[in-house]
Amino acid sequence: MKYQKKLLGFSALIAGLLFSVFSFSQMENPVNWKFSTVQLDEKTYNLIIEATIEKKWHLYSQFFDAGGPMPLQFNFKESPDYKLVGNVTETPNPKEEYDDVFEINVKYFEKYAKFVQKIEVLTDKGFNVKGVVEGQACFEDGKCIPVTADLNFPINGGGEETSDVEENLGTKTETPILVTENRFKHEENANKKSLWGFFFISLLFGIIGILTPCVFPMIPMTVSFFMNKSESRSKNLLKVGIFGFSIMLLYGLVGVIVSLTSAGANFTTVLSTHWIPNLIFFLLFIVFAASLFGLFEFVMPSGLANKADARVDKGGLIAAFFLALTTVIVSFSCTGPIIGALLVKAASGDVLEPTVGMFGFGLGFALPFTILALAPGLMKKMPKSGGWLNSVKVVMGFIILAFSLKYFSNIDQSYNLGLMSREFYLAIWIVIFVLMGFYLLGKIKFKHDSDVHHVGFFRLLLAMFSFIVALYLFPGMFGANLSSVSGLIPPKTSQNFDLTINSTTIATDESELCETPEFSDKMHLAYGMKGYFYYDQAFECAKSQDKPVLLYFTGHSCANCKEMQASVWDNDKVKEIFNNELVLAALYVDERSVILPKPKQFISSRDKKLKQKLGEANADIEIVNFETNTQPYYVLISPDGKVLTNPIGYNTNAEEFLKFLRDGIEEFKKIKELNE
């Protein structure tokens, strides 16, 4: 029982955090903040923070045992102008109760709370006390969201909030405008291809979902519902159609909900690069894999299935819908991890992907039921239930376990932690696929597995495939390109031991940079390319060398970026143009470890927020100048800001990419001739 409580607690925490992530762009705001100051004497002030909390919500206190919800925290910016006196006090006394989920006593406020921080002033001049308050608010139904607010208290006549802009930026208060002439629209073909690809992958997973122990045995029972001889053939066909469409609709609605809550220009970048969602996704995938390996099961409330099943017994066309609902609910213990994995992947990409993916999954899941209901004679040719069904779950567990590493790698790359090199990542993958091969051969056995007395032909093929994948990955330990999986593994810049480095570098006297690239201690370019990581430095060099600039908007966690690099950048003709005929500016939109010097920080003309980190500055430049936030995104631009040819997105065809480069360079030469 205690084990189940712990599992429930972990699931509740994960669910709450996921809700927080998915609600990021729409940001419910159940807590309203009010700030004021009270002067106690010549040198001491009280900073007053008041929170008004909406009905049915509660805000957690600062003080309760660790291991539960997120406590309230007040972080004040250090300054020589003042010092804090004591800690933040809170009134009224918070409510305290035992939380069954986290098994600790928690404290929280309802309706209203007041917080006071005393300070001692150390100067006679005016200044502002600044900081941030962070915490967690929860609704009575259990959903929780993060709450945050910027603190700003003028002391001795200190300036307004805008004084921080002046302090940091001087007169630079808008997004840098790189484009003076943009005659071209950004491409969307890559997104369409990606959506179609994700649809078919989801469709495949929907079909695989049928081949699980929770679902496969339901097929005869479900199909028999449509074999009522007392009803006309046309009515039975209509019921089959309602059943199949209802399954697709139910799964599609889940995707629509995720799509609606993940809209916003910066949402996907934040979701795919920030350490919090990536850590959540990493842990979720581990939990999903453990479930598929048989450690525990995701179980929907039995009452929900019983109520839906009761409506089926009443018959009629509406019964077909409730049969679909019952099928979805009962199958959740096996399909839940698959659905969760798809939604995690989808929510990290295009905002349409959750809807497209879930409709694809629903279609794949409904197809076998629908086909067998239309042609029940095919059931005689179906294999019987058995231990092979559990093997399907376990194989899915191995695959999901392998994919979990991608989210940990995203954290490592975005924050330049250096914890997971490319070869270490590949070593783990190799071990996973080798173990999967041995499992398929019956050498490893899990909790619900039957004994493997002989290895069938299909099982042998899968085992061979597992070992082939491991062998394919092995050369990557020494620097091989592995272009077919490059989007799923760390980039070559994280390779510590690379035997191919000499063969991928073009030595040329003309490829010298104007100066050492800024931030090159944190970021690197693969495949022997040379370039800058800050747009201003790239433009200055382009002006001095009279070359066009290639703006390359990319990301550490961008799978398409890495895949395109592996397919295109390793081309010798591309390398020659990169290193000799243009200046490359690799603008990472998810770089979180580099803080720009104050003179280079700016206030966005889009959202009026201060852009301090290199990644958020690059992301804003892309959105404002080119009205897109997709990566990869390549723009060839003259040093004076003219876009030279149609920008290009994800495209692994080296010849088409070469044409893009040559067209832009040719246009640049024509402009030069006209100006001479």
Image (cartoon, helix red, strand yellow):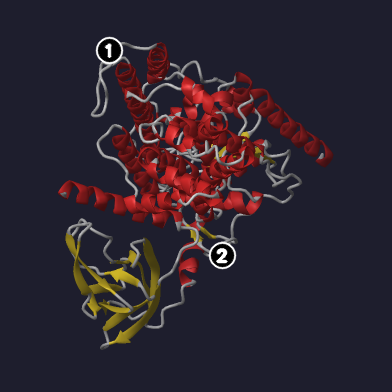
Q: Is residue 500 left or right of residue 67?
A: right
Q: Which residue is mark 1?
A: 453
Q: Is residue 605 left or right of residue 206?
A: right
Callout 1: 10 Å neighbours few (<14), some, many (20+)? few
The residue sitting at 55% across, 64% down in the picture is 608
Give residue 434's position: percent from left, percent from top. 32, 18
Q: Quadrant of residue 43?
A: bottom left
Q: Earlier in the sequence, mark 2 or mark 1?
A: 2
| Amino acid type, callout 2 | Thr
Front-most of residues 462 and 622: 462
Give residue 321's position: percent from left, percent from top. 51, 48
Q: Secondary structure at mark 2?
A: loop
Q: Is residue 629 left or right of residue 31?
A: right
Front-most of residues 541 and 9: 9
Give residue 229's position: percent from left, percent from top. 55, 37
Q: Is 303 situated above or below 476? A: below
The residue sitting at 30% across, 76% down in the picture is 110
Q: Quadrant of residue 452?
A: top left
Q: Is 532 situated above or below 93? A: above
Residue 528 visible in the shown view: no
Q: CA distance from mark 2 to mark 1?
A: 77 Å
Front-most of residues 269 and 65: 65
Front-most of residues 26 and 207: 207
The label on residue 171 is 2
Give residue 479's position: percent from left, percent from top. 42, 20
Q: Residue furthest front?
A: 230
